[in-house]
Structures are given as structure tokens and as C-alpha cells.
Image: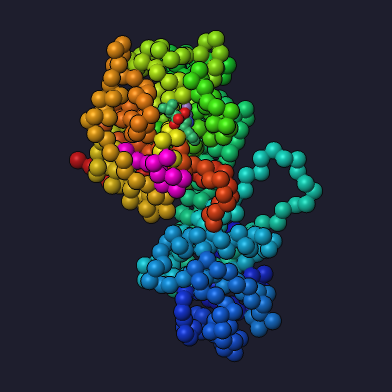
């Protein structure tokens, strides 16, 4: 896939040569100046006249007329150097790779150093290239009957970089590619319809992942879930013909099982709302209600691939939320694994119920730090829109580490408050310790507050991805549909994690 060469070979035959262009180079310097020499200064002229654009994310194709081995040069505009950063580079590359794919190029070369500046070095650029390539060219095939035309995809990318040791570049390419691939795995899980991804299917997926990366695997079936007293998780599954699965993956990257990070992902394979049933418009798309689980599984893939030096336990409660004569209903009181009782006011507030027992179980497995990820509330979409993940925490230093990873991964998040008054709303019930739906006001916040009751004193960050886990439109780094959001953030957070005293 990726080949690294230190010496630029202008005579090498490539289908395309990809070059980054900052605004406004009055005169080319360095490697671009040498390239321009092959063209007797004509490239500089084209830039001056505006025929080659340096505007951020613009793409200009120039025929080489045999002056160099590559058939065409693809200039990718990088905008102003002062405003440049890793995110912009990723998006510009993503757009570029989409264009290369659309032109059915099977092979291309990249002049890596034309994409670097003081804040984004060659290693960053190599990471961005492989990650953006994986992300931008991702496609979910679905289940349409195959057409006879085979799809041509970019299969070989030569990277020219005289500035850095080739091994360093290769390592960065491998890391970036792992991040892209893990995100794509999450996307595919989310895009898969509920009839083809049951809790049992998700458990089998985790089993394969465990076999590939040597994770410890525990899959609790219904009997075991009952024995452990996970009444909140079981209540959600009660109306279903599909058995629930509590999926646990353990990765031990340290000598001792300490400083354990617990990653908990909501794995509702389809959410009808239960007896608090969704509307016919609101129910469509609810196959994506396992986006949190997918992010956790995608992150575990990256963690396994990169052999992180951390200890991680991933816990995924998986079931659908269905209706039948057996289903749970409003007014029911259920007992969670923690012993806390819950009055059910809304069966559509099922995510917090399955997460309650999953959080308790992650602690049971030694998790000392918790991050839960969930397509939890429509309220988060009202509050923050489709581009920002909502966060809550009981521990600011832990949140700082998650936030830093999210900024670096280009997956923005925003912290919502967790005040005593909201905790009181969750604790307000005449018949139980908690209620699962204290009303519409600030409902993203009370949903998070509910989960916090089960984290108790353990440092915990909650991430609500109901708005960010899917995109209705195509974007530079992916197609419409599942985004795989938080996969990269979680993996980067784990990779960089520093225990907090
Ligand atoms: N899975 C939904 C949240 C959701 C909404 C995800 C839209 C993706 C897109 C969740 O289980 C839910 O139904 N939440 C309710 C909570 C309410 C009943 C308190 C909601 O947000 O309406
Ligand atoms: Mn629901
Ligand atoms: Zn749900």
C-alpha cells in the first residue's frame, strides 16, 4: 500500500503526483523549486496567474506534458501557513483522496514535505496521509446487488520524503492507518442494520477481535447476567426475542493489572423506545443506537494494533429495546447490579439503564477510570448540534485528558455541567432510589447524571454522541452515514493516558 522513498525521482512513472501548496509562495522554494526547474519555471507562472490555486482544500490538476515521469500533478491547496494545522491537513488530504479515487487512479505518489510547516512536521503529515486515506475512501457497501463493473481503488501510494528517516515515516504511516481502519470498523458496525447485527452478532464480532489481538474475552449470556443481578440491563432486554450479551474485552499492556481504564459503550442494536414508543419518523435510524459500542470496539482494534502500554477493560451491554407481552413498562421498579433500585418512567430512556449495570461491571473488573460513550439523548442534538459531542464528568483532570485527545483527533466535544440540583432530580422517586426520566428540561444532563450515580466515586467521563455518530451529508473524511466518532479520541486518550493521583 504505502512505499517510502527518500530520493525524489522525477523520472518515475506515476499516474499522479500529489503536492501540497501553501498560500502565497511568490517563488517556489526547496523541493518545489526543483520540481519547477523541470518545468522551466512554468509552474510558478501558473501559481502567479491563479491557474493553480493554493486556497485551502482546492484541487488543481496539471498535465505534465512528459516533463516528468508522473502523468499529472495534483496540487492540493493548504491555505495560509499561519492558519494551518493537523485538522486542516487531514481534511485537505481527505478531499484530495476522494478526488483521486473518483478519477480512478490506481497508483500515485506524494511529495510529503510539501505538506509540512513548523507546527505540522513530517511525522504528523505521514500520520495524516494514511489516516485520511483510510477515512476518506471508506465506503459502506451495504446489501445492494453487485454491479458487474469492478471498482478501481487507489492501491499504491509512494511517499517521497528526503527530510526524515524512512523508518520513522513508516511507523507514522502505520499508526495513522490503524487509526483510520479502526474508525472504519466502527462505521461499518454502525451502518449495519439491526436484523444483521444482533447482540449475539456483536458478541461474535468481539470474539474475532479478541482472537486477532489476544484480548481476554468474557461474554455473559442471559443466565449469567441474571445471576449477577443486572436487573437494569435485563429490563431493557425483557421484551426481546434476542438474548442480551454483556461483552467484556481486556487488554493488559502493563505488568500488573492496575491503573485500569474502563471503556463502556452503549450497544443497543435497535431502539424502538419500548412501550414509550418512538414515532414513525423518530424510530428510523435507530439501528445506530450502538454507536458507543462501535467506538469502543474500534478503539480496542487500534489499541491492539499499536500494542498500547496501558490496561484497558471494555464493557459493552448489548440488546435491542423491543415491545412484547414480556416487555418492561413505565412504573416498573427494577434493581440494578449495584443494588440501587430504579423507577422506570420512560422505557425509551433505556441507554442509561444498560449503562448503569455496565459501569458497575467495569468497576467490578478493576476499572479505576471510566469513560462511557453513548448515543444517549436527542437533547444533546438540541443543545450542541451534529458536530460536537456532549461531555459530562465528576473529575476534571480526567476530562482534561479526554478533551486533549479529542482535540488532537479532530473530534470536538463540550463539557456540560453536573450540579447537585440535577443529581437531585435523578434521585427523586417515591418508590425507588432513582428514576430514569425526570422530564424534558435539560434531558441530556439528567441522562448523564443518572449514569454518574453508578460511577459513584470513580473518576468518570460521559460522552453523548447521539448527534455526532452519524452524518446526513458526505464530508471530506467520509461518506454520509456512520462517522465512527470517538474511536480515535478513545484510542488516543488510552495511548497517552497518565494515571491521576
Ligand atoms: N437512542 C436514543 C437517543 C437518540 C436520539 C440517538 C436520536 C440518536 C438519535 C435514546 O435511547 C432515547 O430514546 N432518548 C430519549 C430520552 C428521553 C426518553 C428521556 C430522547 O432523547 O428522546
Ligand atoms: Mn431510547
Ligand atoms: Zn437509545
Give the quadrant of residue 281: top right
Q: In the image, which residues are magenta? A: 382-392
Q: Is residue 372 left or right of residue 245?
A: left
Residue at (31, 30) in percent of width and height:
449
Q: Position of residue 439 (x, y in %)?
A: 36, 25
Between residue 451 and residue 247, name the one nearer to us. 451
Residue at (45, 62) in percent of width and height:
88
Say if 132 sits above or below 147 in the image: below
Say if 419 sits above or below 433 in the image: below
Q: Is residue 310 magenta?
A: no
Residue at (24, 34) in percent of width and height:
419
Quadrant of the image containing the N terminus? bottom right
Quadrant of the image containing the C terminus? top left
Residue 133 visible from this viewpoint: yes
Q: Position of residue 56 (x, y in %)?
A: 49, 68
Say if 29 sits above or below 380 in the image: below
Give the quadrant of residue 464: top left
Between residue 342 and residue 138, name the one nearer to us. 342
Between residue 299 and residue 308, name the one nearer to us. 299
How was the colour assigned to the protein in this rendering? Answer: rainbow
Residue 488 visible from this viewpoint: no
Between residue 262 and residue 430, name the one nearer to us. 430
Residue at (47, 63) in percent of width and height:
89
Q: Please, which residue is most extreme toward the bottom here? A: 40
Q: Please, which residue is most extreme toward the left here? A: 501
Q: Position of residue 246 (x, y in %)?
A: 46, 24
- Number of numbered discs on residues: 0
Q: Position of residue 318 (x, y in %)?
A: 49, 26
Q: Is residue 371 left or right of residue 248?
A: left
Amino acid at each position: 500500500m504505502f512505499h517510502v522513498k527518500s530520493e525524489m525521482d522525477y523520472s518515475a512513472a506515476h499516474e499522479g503526483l500529489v503536492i501540497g501548496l501553501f498560500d502565497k509562495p511568490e517563488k517556489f522554494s526547496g523541493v518545489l523549486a526543483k520540481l519547477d526547474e523541470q518545468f522551466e519555471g512554468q509552474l510558478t507562472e501558473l501559481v502567479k496567474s491563479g491557474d493553480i490555486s493554493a486556497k485551502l482544500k482546492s484541487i488543481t490538476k496539471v498535465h505534465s506534458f512528459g516533463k516528468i515521469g508522473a502523468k499529472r500533478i495534483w496540487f492540493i491547496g493548504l491555505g495560509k501557513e499561519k492558519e494551518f494545522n493537523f485538522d486542516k491537513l487531514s481534511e485537505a488530504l481527505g478531499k484530495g483522496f476522494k478526488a483521486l479515487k473518483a478519477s480512478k487512479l490506481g497508483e500515485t505518489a506524494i511529495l510529503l514535505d510539501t505538506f509540512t510547516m513548523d507546527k505540522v512536521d513530517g511525522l504528523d503529515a505521514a500520520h495524516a496521509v494514511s489516516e485520511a486515506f483510510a477515512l476518506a475512501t471508506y465506503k459502506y457497501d451495504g446489501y445492494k446487488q453487485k454491479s458487474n463493473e469492478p471498482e478501481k481503488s487507489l492501491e499504491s501510494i509512494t511517499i517521497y520524503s528526503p527530510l526524515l528517516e524512512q523508518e520513522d515515516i513508516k511507523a507514522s504511516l502505520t499508526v495513522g492507518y490503524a487509526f483510520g481502519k479502526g474508525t472504519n470498523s466502527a462505521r461499518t458496525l454502525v451502518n449495519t442494520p439491526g436484523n444483521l447485527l444482533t447482540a449475539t452478532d456483536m458478541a461474535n464480532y468481539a470474539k474475532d477481535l479478541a482472537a486477532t489481538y489476544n484480548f481476554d474475552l468474557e461474554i455473559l449470556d442471559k443466565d449469567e447476567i441474571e445471576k449477577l443481578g443486572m436487573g437494569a440491563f435485563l429490563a431493557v432486554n425483557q421484551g426481546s426475542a434476542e438474548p442480551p450479551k454483556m461483552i467484556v474485552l481486556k487488554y493488559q499492556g502493563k505488568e500488573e493489572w492496575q491503573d485500569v481504564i474502563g471503556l463502556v459503550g452503549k450497544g443497543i442494536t435497535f431502539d424502538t423506545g419500548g412501550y414509550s414508543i418512538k414515532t414513525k419518523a423518530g424510530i428510523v435510524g435507530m439501528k445506530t443506537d450502538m454507536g458507543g459500542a462501535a467506538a469502543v470496539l474500534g478503539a480496542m482494534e487500534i489499541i491492539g494494533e499499536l500494542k498500547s502500554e496501558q490496561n484497558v477493560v471494555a464493557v459493552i451491554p448489548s440488546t435491542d429495546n423491543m415491545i412484547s407481552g414480556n416487555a418492561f413498562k413505565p412504573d416498573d421498579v427494577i434493581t440494578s447490579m449495584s443494588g440501587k433500585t430504579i423507577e422506570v418512567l420512560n422505557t425509551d430512556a433505556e441507554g442509561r439503564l444498560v449503562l448503569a449495570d455496565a459501569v458497575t461491571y467495569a468497576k467490578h473488573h478493576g476499572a479505576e477510570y471510566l469513560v462511557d460513550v453513548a448515543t444517549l439523548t436527542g437533547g444533546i442534538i438540541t443543545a450542541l448540534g451534529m458536530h460536537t459531542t456532549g461531555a459530562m464528568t465528576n473529575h476534571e483532570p480526567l476530562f482534561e485528558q479526554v478533551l486533549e485527545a479529542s482535540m488532537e483527533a479532530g473530534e470536538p466535544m463540550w463539557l456540560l455541567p453536573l450540579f447537585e440540583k440535577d443529581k437531585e432530580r435523578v434521585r427523586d422517586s417515591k418508590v425507588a432510589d432513582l428514576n430514569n426520566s425526570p422530564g424534558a428540561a435539560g434531558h441530556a444532563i439528567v441522562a448523564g447524571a443518572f449514569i454518574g450515580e453508578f460511577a459513584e466515586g470513580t473518576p468518570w467521563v460521559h460522552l453523548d454522541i447521539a448527534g455526532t455518530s452519524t452524518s446526513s451529508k458526505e464530508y471530506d473524511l467520509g461518506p454520509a452515514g456512520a462517522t465512527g466518532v470517538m474511536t480515535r479520541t478513545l484510542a488516543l486518550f488510552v495511548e497517552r493516558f497518565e494515571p491521576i493521583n
